[in-house]
Image: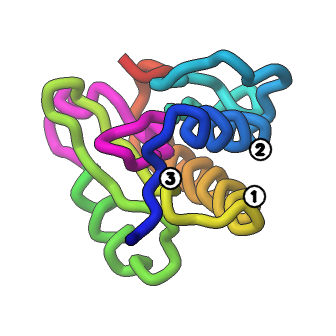
Amino acid sequence: MIPTMSSQSEDSSFLTLVLRILGVDQPEGVSPPVDLIVGGKLPVRVVQLRNQWILMGTIATEISNHEESPLLSLLEQASSMWGTLEGTFCYEKKEDILVLWRNISELREQELDPMISRFLEELEFWRTEAFAAGYTGREVFP
């Protein structure tokens, strides 16, 4: 039998651990999705989808406002660096938002802290790239 994170207490413990790593002082009793600003500047969401825990970060919003989208060059640049990325990009058309995400469900406790740190570094890098390409917009998830 393959172990899964299906019990409510395991889910709660995992979420509490992730939120502590992200700097939340009292994460007990919080339920997903959890939206927060990490380090005073990085919009991050922790969500559970079908027994999978996902860490998401907003890179760019209001993308459709650009006549010539530098988004393509950002994604081309990202694909050339694919081996270094901890997460994956997705564009949510309905929300007009580019997101970096990472499935963290399968990580052991000792792997979480370095992976989350790496994810935040990648998120900060891509937000800087998006800002330099002229993207502005919401600082939080819609």
How many angstroms separate mark 1 from mark 2 (CA)? 6 Å
Question: Dot 1: within a 10 Å radius of its alpha carbon, few (fewer than 14), some, or many (20 or more) residues?
Answer: some
Find residue 56 and report its horizontal and vertical position in percent.
46, 42
Residue 49 or residue 12, whichever sits in front: 12
Foreground mark, 3 or 2, reads: 2
Mark 3 highlights which residue? Answer: 126
User: In the rendered structure, which segment of residues is drawn in magenta?
Assistant: 47-69
Find residue 2 and report its horizontal and vertical position in percent.
40, 70
Find residue 8 and report its horizontal and vertical position in percent.
52, 32
Residue at image coords 52%, 56%: 104
Three-letter residue code for mark 3: Trp
Give the residue furthest to the right. 25
In the rendered view, tell whether residue 34 sits above or below residue 93: above
Three-letter residue code for mark 1: Asp
Residue at image coords 37%, 60%: 88
Give the side of residue 109 with respect to residue 61, left or right: right
Looking at the image, is mark 3 or mark 1 earlier in the sequence? 1
Kindly indicate the quadrant of the structure image that contains residue 15.
top right
Give the number of the disc on residue 21. 2
Residue at image coords 23%, 44%: 91
Three-letter residue code for mark 2: Ile
Question: Dot 3: within a 10 Å radius of its alpha carbon, few (fewer than 14), some, or many (20 or more) residues?
Answer: many
How many angstroms separate mark 3 from mark 2 (CA)? 21 Å
Question: SS at mark 2?
Answer: helix
Question: SS at mark 3?
Answer: helix
In the rendered view, tell whether residue 33 sits above or below residue 109: above
> Quarter holding the C terminus?
top left
Residue 24 or residue 5, whichever sits in front: 5
Question: SS at mark 1?
Answer: helix
Give the number of the disc on residue 17. none
Give the side of residue 12 with respect to residue 25, left or right: left
Question: Dot 2: within a 10 Å radius of its alpha carbon, few (fewer than 14), some, or many (20 or more) residues?
Answer: some
